[in-house]
């Protein structure tokens, strides 16, 4: 298994760029199942999760061609697919469940392995299923699989009990081909939901209100294939901005979209960083030592849970005490024990972590437990004195495109060791 070895203490400086957004790419790739023909997706990040989604589509009979170097995916979708996502793939990536909505809508049948819990929480899909049932799908659970059947879905009014990103996306993809109007209330407002709606509309769907908590969909009979370039990754962008903040550096992240990162930008400024919009990107200049800020994770436009671990690494070297509350996932503090091994002073009580900033961290061997936790350990390693070895880097590779190369180009002493 690969590891990343960092010798900390370098100030990061220069220009880098954001890759395409993982969490936009995954639902968009799944949405190809809604229309027969050849689809082209551009600005697709070269990530393990993208590769898994393409495997899922290939097992169904789609013909997916990926030019990772050009960041381009071409998918040929046949008239009939084998509407099944097997356990072997879903267990490696729960976002595979995003094929459920499109399959139920266009193929009238779907058999998708039920995702289990994961490192950060139980993550049930009850709201996805509730939405599909409201649209008239008949849902059964058997042998660890969700089976959905429907003649043609019927538009309905759906109120989610809680805000769910992939749940909103799954139901939106099902409703575009339903007969009549669907209203999704309490919808997720994430930029990735808006982006999926943009793609669906390009395919001929009639979706309005995405980006607000009420999405209206007028069902259509058929959709056509699409050519689309995916938005930049706001979480990767944010992680790179924090790399500037934690090293007292100065980084311009080209392509980063300020409107997608408002909550983070506000917190970085509050901590003493200078953040500006510049030449089609965002620039962050870190102070000698950041001040402390409190964070409460919330659904968009609140502070993203996907940035909580990275900001915790930053707060572990702030000049004060920071209170970080995780409201989205029940077990998303797995990085705490590892950060403590590097000298961070963090105590956790339920969903609240109190981080007392230390003047320095010390390099150590640490282990990544999930994607964003790995990113936080890499950030801590950039700041720490001496050598940090982050193992289990496959977590990082699920969601960051060659992060170590981007950081090295900015002046970090960082390398990947093949294992
Ligand atoms: N939830 C339910 N029932 C459901 C759906 C969700 O109880 O039917 C709960 C979850 O257990 C969680 C909360 O609702 O406590 C929010 O979960 P949500 O469904 O919004 O998360 P998700 O759609 O599974 C996406 C991202 C995550 C990101 C979350 C929150 C994708 C592919 N994944 O997950 O990204 O953390 O939204 O913003 O879009 C990551 O990239 O590292 C990552 C984990």
Image (spheres, rainbow, N blue to C red):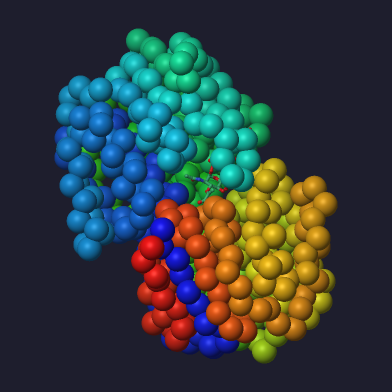
Q: Is residue 179 above or below residue 8?
A: above
- Residue 395, position as x, y percentages in the image: 47, 55
Q: Is residue 304 above or below residue 403?
A: above
Give the side of residue 88 with respect to residue 395, left or right: left
Question: Residue 402 lies in what quarter of the image?
Answer: bottom left
Quarter the N terminus occupies:
bottom left
- Residue 39, position as x, y percentages in the image: 21, 42
- Residue 70, position as x, y percentages in the image: 21, 62
x 46%, y 60%: residue = 393
Question: Residue 152 lies in what quarter of the image?
Answer: top left
Q: Is residue 378 visible?
A: no
Q: Is residue 338 visible?
A: yes
Quarter the C terminus occupies:
bottom left
- Residue 64, position as x, y percentages in the image: 20, 42
Q: Name the residue nearer the viewer: 214 or 192.
A: 192
Q: Is residue 74 above or below residue 342?
A: above
Q: Is residue 368 above or below residue 121?
A: below
x 58%, y 25%: residue = 126
Q: Name the residue nearer the viewer: 104 or 49.
A: 49
Q: Name the residue nearer the viewer: 146 or 158.
A: 146
Q: Quadrant of ligand 1?
A: top right
């Amino acid at each position: 298994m690969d590891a990343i070895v960092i010798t900390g203490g370098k100030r990061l400086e220069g220009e880098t760029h954001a890759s395409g957004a993982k969490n936009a790419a995954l639902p968009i790739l799944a949405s190809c199942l809604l229309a027969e023909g050849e689809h082209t997706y551009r600005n697709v990040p070269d990530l393990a999760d993208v590769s898994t989604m393409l495997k899922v589509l290939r097992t169904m009979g789609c013909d997916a061609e990926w030019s990772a170097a050009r960041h381009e995916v071409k998918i040929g979708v046949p008239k009939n697919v084998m509407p099944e996502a097997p356990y072997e793939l879903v267990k490696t990536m729960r976002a595979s469940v995003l094929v459920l909505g499109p399959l139920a809508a266009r193929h009238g049948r779907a058999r998708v392995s039920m995702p289990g819990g994961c490192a950060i929480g139980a993550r049930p899909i009850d709201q996805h299923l509730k939405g599909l049932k409201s649209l008239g799908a008949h849902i059964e659970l058997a042998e660890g699989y969700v089976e959905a059947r429907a003649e043609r879905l019927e538009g309905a009014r759906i109120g989610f009990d809680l805000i769910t990103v992939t749940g909103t996306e799954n139901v939106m993809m099902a409703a575009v081909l339903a007969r009549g109007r669907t209203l999704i209330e309490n919808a997720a407002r994430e930029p990735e939901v808006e982006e999926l709606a943009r793609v669906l509309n390009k395919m001929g769907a009639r979706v309005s209100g995405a980006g607000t908590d009420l999405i209206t969909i007028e069902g259509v009979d058929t959709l056509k294939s699409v050519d689309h370039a995916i938005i930049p990754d706001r979480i990767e962008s944010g992680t790179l901005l924090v790399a500037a903040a934690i090293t007292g550096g100065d980084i311009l992240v080209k392509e980063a979209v300020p409107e997608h990162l408002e909550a983070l930008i506000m917190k970085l400024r509050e901590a003493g960083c200078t953040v500006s919009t510049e030449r089609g990107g965002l620039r962050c200049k870190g102070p000698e030592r950041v001040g402390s800020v409190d964070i409460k994770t919330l659904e968009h436009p609140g502070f993203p849970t996907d940035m909580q671990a990275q900001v915790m690494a930053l707060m572990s070297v702030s000049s004060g005490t920071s209170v970080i509350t995780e409201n989205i996932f029940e077990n998303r503090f797995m990085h705490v024990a590892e950060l403590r091994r590097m000298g961070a002073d963090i105590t956790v009580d339920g969903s609240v972590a109190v981080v007392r900033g230390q003047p320095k961290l010390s390099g150590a061997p640490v282990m990544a437990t999930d994607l964003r936790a790995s990113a936080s350990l890499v950030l801590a390693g950039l700041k720490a004195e001496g050598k940090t070895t982050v193992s289990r880097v496959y977590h990082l590779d699920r969601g960051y495109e060659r992060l170590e190369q981007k950081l090295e180009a900015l002046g970090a002493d960082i390398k990947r060791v093949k294992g």
